[in-house]
Each structure stands twice: as structure tokens, then as C-alpha cells.
Image (cartoon, helix red, strand yellow):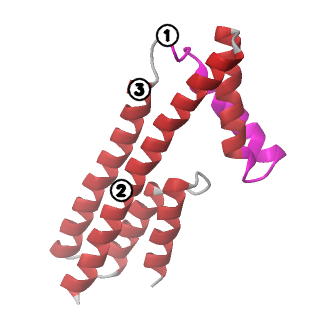
């Protein structure tokens, strides 16, 4: 029961960047594997969850960098945005994290292009890419949860 709750929180964390998301689901799967009786079936299911975890992380890192590199995305965009996100988290708890990130991306593009509308357009493209990454993590997180649920049916 608790494992399922942690996985649900992890799924929410793939969409809302407050919780560690897919990592939380993976840790819950590992905990279930160890505590429920670590036999071959459990480890096989956990191996499948680990494959989903690695694919989810890898693809969610690859897509935004592929779609937002080059002239449209200056070199230090994500670094500056991350600094603004951390500052935003402490200035305006919870909501400040994504808000600070967006402001950081926008300011970096504004500094680079010196054109408000261009910076706004490129910021939108960057955010779409990050949204796609969140969707990918959510889908792979869901696949991990389904693997666990199937494991409950197989093991019992």
C-alpha cells in the first residue's frame, strides 16, 4: 500500500517538478523488491523497471537538448535558469521553482537577442521541449508503476 502511494507521488512528480518523480518510483520499486521477498521474479520485474527508468531519464535529457541547442539557445541558458529556479524556490516556496526557471530562461534569451518578442518565442520553444521531457518521464514512470502492479498479480 505504502509503495503504491510513493509511486503515485512519484508520478505526480514527473509532471510537477517538486518531487523527484521517476527516481522516487524507481526507489519504491527497489524497496518493494527487497522487502516483499527478493526472488527471481521480483528481481526480473525490478530489472524491467530499471530499464524503463534509464530510458525515461535518457530520453528526457536528450529531447530538450536536441530541440533547444544551437543559435536559438545560448550556452548558459539552463545554468542561469537553474540558478533562478533555486532562488525562486526560496523566495516563493513551491511555485517559485518553475517560475524562477521560466524567468531565468527568458532573461538569458533577452540578454542574448536583445529582442523581447524573440526572447519570448524562444522561451516558449524551450518550455515546450521541457514539457515533452516531463511527458516522457511520466510515460516511463507509468510503465514502471504498471510493471509493479503486474508484479503484485504475478507474485501473489
Compared to residue 150, the image places residue 128 above or below, namely above
Q: Callout 1: few (<14), some (14-19), or many (20+) C-alpha neighbours within 10 Å?
A: few
Secondary structure state at the residue bearing disc 1: loop
Classed neighbour count for the residue bearing mark 3: other residues with Cα under 10 Å, few (<14), some (14–19), many (≥20): some
- Dividing the image into 4 quarters, which one contains the C terminus? bottom left
The residues bearing labels 1 and 2 have C-alpha atoms spaced at a distance of: 30 Å
- Going 26% across and 65% down the picture, which residue do you hit? 46
Q: Secondary structure at mark 2?
A: helix
Q: Is residue 80 left or right of residue 141?
A: right
Instruction: Say which residue appears at 69% left-offset and 12% top-offset.
Output: 115
**Along the line of sight, which residue is nearer the eye, 134 or 3?**
134
| In the rendered image, the vertical position of residue 104 relative to residue 35, given as above or below | above
Quadrant of residue 124 within the rendered picture:
top right
The numbered mark, 3 or 2, whose residue comes first in the sequence reads 3
The residue labelled by disc 2 is: 139
Residue at the far bottom: name it: 156
* Residue 95 within the segment the image draws in magenta: yes
Query: Are circles 3 and 2 on residues that touch, CB within 8 Å?
Result: no
The residues tagged by marks 1 and 3 sit, at their Cα atoms, a distance apart of: 11 Å
* Quadrant containing the N terminus in the rendered view: bottom left
The one of 72 and 14 positioned closer to us in this rendering: 72
Estimate the x, y position of residue 53 in percent, counting from the top left: 33, 53
Q: Residues within 10 Å of mark 2 (few under 14, many from 20)?
A: some
Q: Which of 39 and 16 lies nearest the eye of the viewer?
A: 16
Q: Which residue is mark 3?
A: 67
The residue segment tinted magenta is 72-96
Secondary structure predominantly adopted by residues drawn in magenta: helix
Residue 71 numbered tag: 1
Magenta segment: does it hold 40?
no
Amino acid at each position: 500500500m505504502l509503495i503504491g502511494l510513493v509511486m503515485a507521488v512519484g508520478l505526480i512528480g514527473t509532471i510537477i517538478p517538486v518531487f523527484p518523480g521517476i527516481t522516487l518510483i524507481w526507489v519504491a520499486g527497489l524497496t518493494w523488491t527487497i522487502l516483499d521477498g527478493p526472488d527471481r521474479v521480483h528481481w526480473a520485474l525490478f530489472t524491467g523497471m530499471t530499464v524503463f527508468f534509464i530510458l525515461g531519464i535518457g530520453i528526457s535529457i536528450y529531447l530538450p537538448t536536441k530541440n533547444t541547442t544551437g543559435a536559438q539557445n545560448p550556452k548558459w541558458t539552463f545554468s542561469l535558469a537553474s540558478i533562478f529556479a533555486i532562488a525562486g524556490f526560496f523566495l516563493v516556496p513551491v511555485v517559485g521553482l518553475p517560475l524562477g526557471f521560466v524567468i531565468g530562461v527568458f532573461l538569458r534569451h533577452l540578454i542574448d537577442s536583445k529582442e523581447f518578442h524573440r526572447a519570448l518565442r524562444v522561451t516558449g520553444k524551450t518550455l515546450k521541449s521541457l514539457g515533452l521531457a516531463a511527458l516522457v518521464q511520466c510515460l516511463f514512470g507509468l510503465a514502471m508503476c504498471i510493471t509493479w502492479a503486474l508484479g503484485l498479480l504475478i507474485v501473489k
